Amino acid sequence: MVLKVFFPQCCNRADSGLLVGRWISGHDSAVVLAVVHYPFIPGQVKQYVQQMKAQSGGELSVLGSWSLPKDGQEGMESFLRDLSTIFPQERWLQINRQLGKTGFTCQVLQRDQNGKVIQRETKKKVEGGDEEEEEEEEKVIFVHYEQKKVMFSQLHPLENGVPDPKTDPPSELRQMFQSVAGSAPLFFLDRYDDGPLKSTHWQSDGREASILVELLKQASVPLCMLLGWLLSIWTWISNARVFSLFPLRFLSSKLSTCVQLSHRTEHMRTLSSAKPAAGHTHFIRKANMVVSFLVDVSLGMLLIWWLYRDDHISMLANTLVPAADHVAKELEELLQWLMGAPAGLKMNRALDQVLGRFFLYHIHLWISYIHLMSPFIEGILWYGGLSACFGLTFALSLLSDMVALLTFHIYCFYVYGARLYCLKIYGLSSLWRLFRGKKWNVLRQRVDSCSYDLDQLFIGTLLFTVLLFLLPTTALYYLVFTLLRLVVVLFQGVIHLSVDFINSFPLFAVGLRLTRSHRLAEGVKFRVLCEEPGTALHLLMEINPLKCSTVVQNYRTPTYSCYPKDSWAALIKKLFVGELIYPWRHKTTKTD
C-alpha cells in the first residue's frame, strides 16, 4: 500500500507545527495546504479549521504534524505526536526533517478498533554495511508541488468549462488541483496578521495583489453600467419598426458592415452583463473579447492616423476613379476579343454579337455611373474612414462592401452568363432523357420511363441541336465572367478571413499560454527530487502547459463570419452546371 502526500515546496523549511489539508476521497492520498506554527492553542486551531472549512466549502482537517528541530525544541517531536489524541483522525501523519538532509521521514499513526494508536514506519535501516528492510505495511511517497502555480492552474480537458462528475469522475490529480484552488481563504493568513495563529503557505510573506487590477475592478462597475445603458439605447433603435421592413432587413443581412456591427453589439452585451463568468472557459472567452476589442480599436486608430496624415484620402479618391475606368476599359477589350474569334475558336456569330453588345451596353452604363459619383467619392472615403475608430474590422467590412458595389457590373455579367448557361445545360439534359424514353418525375423526384410520339421526338431533336450548337458560345462567356467573379470573391474572402481572425483569435489565452504557461495545464510530469537512504521517495511535480494549437481550438471565440456553404465537390458541381454561388451566406443559414 502506497500513501502519496502532496507537499508544497514553500513549506519545506517551515517551523514545526500542524499540517492542515485534506484527504482525497477514493484515493490513498493527502494534500498538504499549510503548516500552522507552534506555539498555538489546539482549540484555536480547531476553530480556525472549521472557519476555513465553512468559507471554502470543502473538506479541511488537520492531517498530522510537521517537525523541523531547532535549538531549544528537543521535546517538540513527542509533543506533536501526542496531539493526535486531540485531533482524532484515522491516520495521523508525523513528518520529520533533519537539518542537513533534503528528504523527510514519515510515520503513519493509525488507530485500531479499541482506539489504540499503532505506529508504522516507512524507512530503511542500514546496519553493518548490509541493508536490512523493515517489514512495511504502508510506504509513503512525497510529491512536491509549487502551490502558487497549482493554485492558479486549470487542468484540461474541460467539458463545457466545468468537468461533469457523472460522466467523468474526478481523477486523483484533478481533485488535488481543485483542493488547492478551492482553499483560497486559507491563504489569507500571513505573517503580518496580529492573530494568535501563524502559518506557512505560498502567501506567507504577504498577499500578492496588483494596484492596477484592484483599480480596474473598482472602475468596472460604473463602466459596465454605462455600457449597458448605451447598449439598451442602441437595442431600442435597432428594434425600431422601420428597420424591420424588407429592403432594410435584406440589406443589413447582406452588408458586411451591418453583420460586423451586430457581432460587436453581441460582444458588448456579453461583457456588460452583471452575471459573473459561469466557468473557466467562459471567463477566458470574455477576456478574449476584451483584448480583441482593444486590439481592434488600436489598429483602427493607427489606420485613421495613416489615412488622415499627408492627405492620403485625396490620393485614394484620385486613384479610385482612374482605376475603375481602367477596369472598364479592360472589360471592353475583353468583350471585343470574345466577339471575334477568341483563341481561334469559331463561335455562333449572331449569338456572339448579341451577347457582346448586351454586355458592352452595361459597361457604358457603369462608366457613366462612376463618373456621376466621382465628385462624391472623396467625401464618402473621408467619412467612411472615420468608421475605423470603432475598429479595424469595421474599416475592412466597409472595404468589402465598397468592393462589392464597385464590381457590381461584374456580378451582373456573371449572373446573366450563369443563368443562360444553366438554362441550356438543364434543357440539354432534359432533351437527352427524351431520346432515351425517360422523363423526370417531379412528384417522386426520380427518372421514370415514358413513351413519346413522333412529333415530340422531332421537336425535341430540333431543340437539342439548336441548344447544343449554341452551347460553346454561351459557355465561353460564362467561363470568362465566372473567372472574373471568382477573383472578386477571392479578394472579399481574404478580407472576411482577416475580420474573422481579429474577431475570433484568442489573444488573451495565447498570451496567457506564452507568459504564464502554468495557467493552462494539459497534465503533469514527475521527476525524482530526492532518494536518500533512510527517507521516503521524493518526486517533483511539474506542470505540462497546453499546446498553442489546443489553446486556439478550445478558446476560439464564435463568430458570424462568412464561409463557403458547400464542399469543394459541391462547389465544382455548381460551377459546372451553372448554379449561382452566394459566398455571403453563413453556415448556420445553409439553404438549397
Image: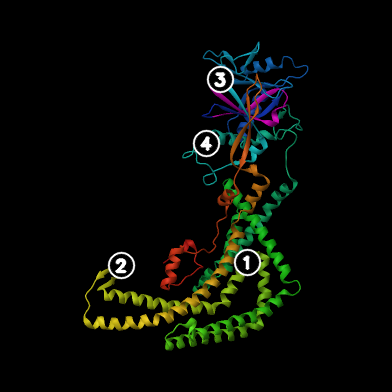
Query: What is the spatial separation of the Cα atoms under label 1 and label 4, in whole angstroms?
Result: 45 Å
3 or 4: tag closer to the N-terminus: 3
Q: Residue furthest right?
A: 71
Amino acid tagged 2? Gln
The span from disc 2 to disc 3 (Cα, nearest Å) is 75 Å
Q: Is tag 4's residue or tag 2's residue first in the polypeptide sequence?
A: 4
State which region is magenta.
1-24
Quadrant assignment for the C terminus: bottom left
Q: Nearer the viewer, mark 3 or mark 1?
A: 3
| Amino acid beneath label 3 | Glu
Look at mark 3 in the image and give the residue it sits on: 138
Residue topped by disc 2: 445
Which mark identifies residue 394? Answer: 1
How far apart marks 3 and 1 lie (CA) works out to 66 Å
Helix or strand or loop: what does disc 1 sit on?
helix
Q: Secondary structure at mark 2?
A: loop
Q: Callout 4: 10 Å neighbours few (<14), some, many (20+)? A: some
State whether residue 272 appears in this view. no
Residue shown at the point (59%, 55%) measured from the top left:
270
